[in-house]
Amino acid sequence: MKFNTKHFTPQKSLLTALFLFIISFHISSQETGQASDNKNEFTIYVMPSLYPLDWQSPSALFKSAKSCYFKTISVKDNYLLGHIAVGIKSPLLKSPLLIAQASASTQEKLDLLFKQKVGLAIMGAPLQGRLETNEELTHKLNVYRKRNKLAFIRYRISDNAVKRMLTFIDEYSKKMNNKNAPCDFYGGAFWPGYKNEGSGCSAFGMVLLDLVNLLPEKEVKIWKVDVNLPMTLIGGEYNNKKKIKTSAIKRADQWHNGVGVENVDYVKHFSYEPSIMFDWIHRKRTENDSVYAPVEEDGAPGLLVDGTAVQFDESEPIFRTRTEPNLFVEYYFRKINQYNANSNN
């Protein structure tokens, strides 16, 4: 194709080039999902389970998780139940941060399930944990991107929000005794915003949003799974070393109805479900929402939110004290206190 340059003066050519540059820069910024300048960005990366999980009942969850396991047993770089990682990009950092909370031992889970037969206690039991590194998460994100199983929500945030998040990560990684830091523990009952508690993978990302008043109330209700675990399906050290048979879980066609004494008849459990969040991101991208703008990063679909003007109380403590008791968390603190007592003797 040839352009007619007869009516193009040098001034017009310069203005045209400048206009095209501005337009292409704007489009490129929207398509990549990355900031057009050096602003602060916080990103939640969501990786769903490779096959659907059914939370309708203990039986449905057991069967769907079992099916997912056997269908993906030979798949490398796989998070069986999905995963969430977070990234922070800021001029306050020497390089972008990519981090996530994970369990540290698959064998520990297998022992609890098949030797101790703890049943649904596996959903809240304190396990060995660790923080995943930038290098390994970069690899995992690329793997999930190629599978079309990666989505994200990116927030533009203020300097003060970045500082508060980094303070949390630093404190969360510090030793609380001579041996362990909170990040050394993983479990579905933890909320890392409480003092000295570990975290699950999704809670780690959500607490960072909560710290800077960006955890959206409406969306939380959609992203969250909230169930009551029947004590009859909780075993091991959490219930007089009772062994839970697989057949009992298979027959359980409903969660506990919440009638009775909490932590005696049932245990409350909630988690932010990566697969639900993944599907929600895809739906939201089609809704022309005024808050969530559709963007992409290297082909992965995402949403962009401007949170730079969101205010939060900087005087509030980074960590709060848990006020509602939880069977699994109480067990965790008994173990921590026992270790500290033995260390002082």
Image (cartoon, grey):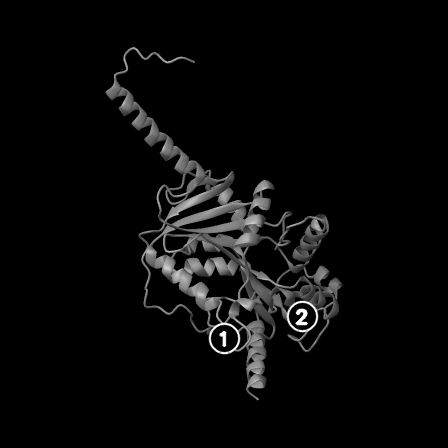
Residue 271, label in figure = none
Locate residue 323, reporting x and y percent. Answer: 46, 74
**Quadrant occupied by the N terminus:** top left
Which residue in the structure is indicated by mark 2?
Answer: 232
Which one is in front, 271 or 318? 318
Q: Position of residue 50 (x, y in %)?
A: 63, 47
The residue tagged 1 is: 176
**Which amino acid is tagged 1?**
Met
Dot 2: within a 10 Å radius of its alpha carbon, few (fewer than 14), some, or many (20 or more) residues?
A: some
Q: Residue at x 64, y 51 (%)?
A: 78
Label 2 residue SS: helix
- Is any part of residue 260 visible from this angle? no
In the image, residue 175 above or below residue 222? below
Mark 1 or mark 2: which is in front? Answer: 1
Instruction: Please give left or right for residue 216 compared with residue 159 in the image.
Output: right
Q: Is residue 5 above or below residue 237?
A: above
Looking at the picture, tell me which residue is in the foreground, 340 or 291.
340
